[in-house]
Image: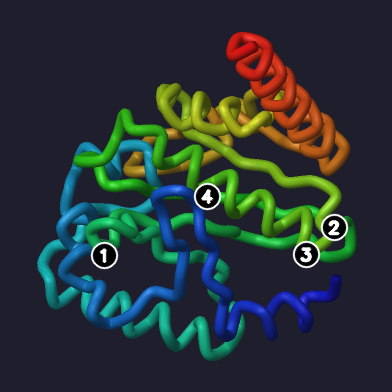
Amino acid sequence: MTMSDIQRIFRDPPKLHTARLTLRKIKRSDAADMYEYSCDPELTRYLLWDPHDDLRFTERYVDYLNERYRDGEYYDWGVELTSERKLIGTAGFTKFDAQNNCAEVGYVISRAYWGRGIAPEALEAVVRFGFVELNLHRIEARYMAGNERSRRVMEKCGMTYEGTRREALYVRGAYKDVGMCSLLFSDWVAKNASARAGASADKRTASADTL
């Protein structure tokens, strides 16, 4: 898939649905929800951006994102908790290497919702879209050293740790090591085949128990 194709898709990204989440385009009306988690210094501790100063800053940022949507140059979805109709984070692609059918993914989930398996659920939806709809061969993700929580999210989605680039980022006055995980299309197919086989075995066991 070419970058022109990718940009065309993300000018109006399709909604993605999971058991608990709706991944959809970020709207101006999401600004208050976004500010609620983006002002949290603990959330941004291992990210490349600083906490939002105030709601007005977030509103301007959402306006900027919508300009990038219009240009097909923003590849994130807003992550909405469907039952609450509330934006609790973002997930999507940070960059593409169209020539090599590769992309990098990223995600941010409000700290109020940590520990519920929401980040892996959102990331798995993005990964599925990447492999099925964008025909990607490889999906990768990076995390700043110390952010083991983010690495666990990657591994829950089937990603393999590949190594650490030493002092690869200069952030807030210090050099940071950066870990890399990845998932190939063949890995993803095998993972899902194993999951389906396990589910079928569970069903067979349950049926046998009722006999």
Rounded to the nearest angstrom, the CA distance separating label 2 from label 1 is: 34 Å
Rounded to the nearest angstrom, the CA distance separating label 3 from label 4 is: 16 Å
**Neighbour class for label 1 at 10 Å: few (<14), some, many (≥20)?**
few
User: What's the mark number on residue 134?
Assistant: 3
Inspect the image, locate mark 2, and give the three-letter code of the amino acid beneath it. Answer: Asn
Relative height, residue 88 to residue 202 (above, below)? below
Q: Which residue is mark 2?
A: 101
2 left or right, relative to 143:
right
Which of the marked residues, 4 or 2, is nearer the chain's N terminus?
Answer: 2
Residue displayed at 46% across by 70% down? 24
Q: Position of residue 52 (x, y in %)?
A: 20, 61
Which of the marked residues, 2 or 3, is nearer the chain's N terminus?
Answer: 2
User: What's the mark number on residue 63?
Assistant: none
Q: Which residue is mark 1?
A: 85
Outermost left residue:
54
Q: Which residue is mark 4?
A: 106
